[in-house]
Image (cartoon, grey):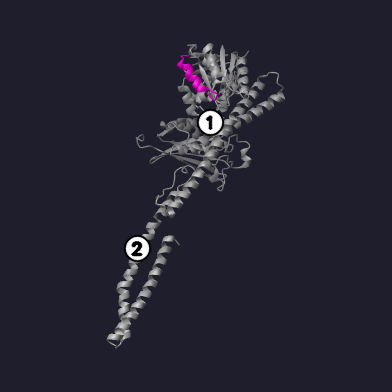
Amino acid sequence: MRIRTRLTLWYAAVLAVSLLLISGSAYHELAEQMERSHKVQPIRHAVYEASEIIFHVGLPAIVLGLAGGWWLTRRTLRPLAELTKAAKGIDERTLSRPLPHSGNGDELDELAVVLNMTQARLHESFKRIHEFTLHASHELKTPLTVLRGELETALRDEDLPAAQRERALSQLDEVERLSKIVDGLALLTKADTGQVKLKKDAIELDELVRDIYADAIILAEPAGVKVDLAACDLITVMGNAHRLRQLLLNLADNAVKYNEAGGSISMELRRVKDTARFAIANTGPGISADLLPRVFDRFFRGDPAHSADADGCGLGLSIAQWIADAHGGTIQMESVPGKLTSVTLNLPIPSQVSV
Amino acid sequence: MRVLVVEDEKKTASFIRKALQDAGFAADVCHNGNDALVAAQGTPFDAIILDIMLPGRDGLSVLRQLREAKNTTPVLLLSARGELDERVEGLNAGADDYLPKPFALVELAARVRALTRRGAGQSKSPLLHVGDLTLDTNTHQARRGEANFELTAREYRLLEFLMRSAGRICGRMAILEKVWDYDFDPGSNLVDVYIKRLREKIDAGFETKLFHTVRGMGYLMKEPP
């Protein structure tokens, strides 16, 4: 039961009891008066008079009292409702925004102040985690540079025995993978704290899609995967060409990587009202429904059996989602395991360039 | 050709120097910004490799100081941050190129070579040759012996880039940047797949191979010895 309802009910009960008490004493008073003046049928008259008072004065008073109580509790609790609404919107990114408080020093105001202090502490912790990740990724780059340089210098030596050369090359591969992870992590951490500013221009999205389509054909060819572009509406969006290209290529790359021999990929770009909708679907093992909500999580690997041969850094889709977000868009994945997996990207088409 | 290497991390400085020496450059090393400024103002270098994060005076400040003093030596910035903003800031401060850490040494050598060659002018002929392969940069036609090759736009750009850098290893990042306009690693094996296709087109039917893979580093085209 809501506090407002509860308070109103209590209030009604109190009013009713006081009304009963008042009417009881009124009845006594009337009965005595009548007994003194008429002495005939005093009881019936007193009851009649008393109930008349109750019906004509008491009930309206109760109704008025209830309405007043309702209004009063509502007014008292309004800051609480506002607080609830504001608190609902709290996430990692809005932590720095304080909750509203009246400043009148009442209990609710005190609560808001305490909540704000808690929030500030949380914000501080989050900031420290982000800073830590960012520093860690920067600090990792120096030893990675050294490692890479040492390995390359070793490989330059023509007399290096074949077995050692093989070992150095495999180490070089791992250093490269590690570098990619560190880069991706630094990018996402900076994106989390709003430190990455994307320069946006008018981008012909259809041209970008056709470019990626051409790349996808080439990427898919060795696996015998067919690619087709079902539709490519002419659409201009405001965006960062590099990042959008990265996003599309990442989706195309996944569609090839997680496909099956002799499978297919279908792409399309369509205008749906004020939205540019890019969809890419691929055949292949797909992802089970329980894992689907986590595909955009950092370092998420769908099927452990498939992670060994796919050489990504585990951050591709997280980065894709960030790019979509940064363009005011959305990205979703659907999958029917064993049949079709599709990713849909929606980007807003700004009115000034959508001619 | 003499290059100044400004890098506080001793090991990194040492293999950069070694790689540059292997590539035929003479290299001087400084470990902090102030020394670098003194060295650059006292000696005419052909290029400067400048780390941004330096103790004392940072790389960008060194660079601004040099440019204010009308020193036009080409500068390649190195940075552990590798952010677009920083790249733009560096180029605005007067840098000629920018390389994020960790980098491949072939990448570094290629960029330094490009910097020192800048201004020296390239050959004006529209025809590029590697062995018996000819590429006409006007008509985008590739020919080898009697065979003519149909090239897509992307294949043409890739082949042109490799032929212009003939004899030198082209790192994957350099190819992505020059042929695809990516200035970050998109984490795809696009380059390898495209090279494989070019190879199938141009090398497959011939005895002498022009395309070579240098594992862990990149690709190169070179004439048979």
**Classed neighbour count for the residue bearing mark 1: other residues with Cα under 10 Å, few (<14), some (14–19), many (≥20):** many
1 vs 2, front mark: 2
Residues B196 and A78: in front is A78
Secondary structure under the numbered disc 1 in the rendered image: loop
Q: Does residue A235 lie above or below B156 as drawn?
A: below
Q: Amino acid at mark 1?
A: Pro
Image coordinates of residue B79 in percent, x first then y, are: 54, 25
Image coordinates of residue B150 in percent, x first then y, are: 51, 22
Q: CA distance from mark 1 to mark 2?
A: 66 Å
Q: Which mark is residue A246?
A: none
**Classed neighbour count for the residue bearing mark 2: other residues with Cα under 10 Å, few (<14), some (14–19), many (≥20):** few
**Residue A171 seen in the figure:** yes
Which residue is farthest left?
A37
Q: Does residue B193 lie above or below B29 as drawn?
A: below
Q: Is residue B69 in the magenta section? A: yes
Q: Amino acid at mark 2?
A: Gly
**Residue B203 seen in the figure:** no
Image coordinates of residue B5 in percent, x first then y, are: 57, 18
Quadrant containing the C terminus of chain B is top right
Quadrant containing the N terminus of chain B is top right
Q: Is residue A69 in the magenta section? A: no
Image coordinates of residue A326 in percent, x first then y, are: 45, 37
Q: Mark 1 and mark 2, same subunit?
A: no
Tell which subunit mark 2 falls on.
A
What segment is highlighted magenta in the picture? B52-71
Q: Which residue is mark 1?
A: B186
Marks 1,2: beta carbons within 8 A: no
Tell which subunit mark 1 falls on.
B
Q: Which residue is mark 2?
A: A68
At x 38% / y 40%, what residue is drawn?
A274
Q: Does residue B118 lie above or below A16 as drawn?
A: above
Q: Quadrant of residue A348?
A: top left
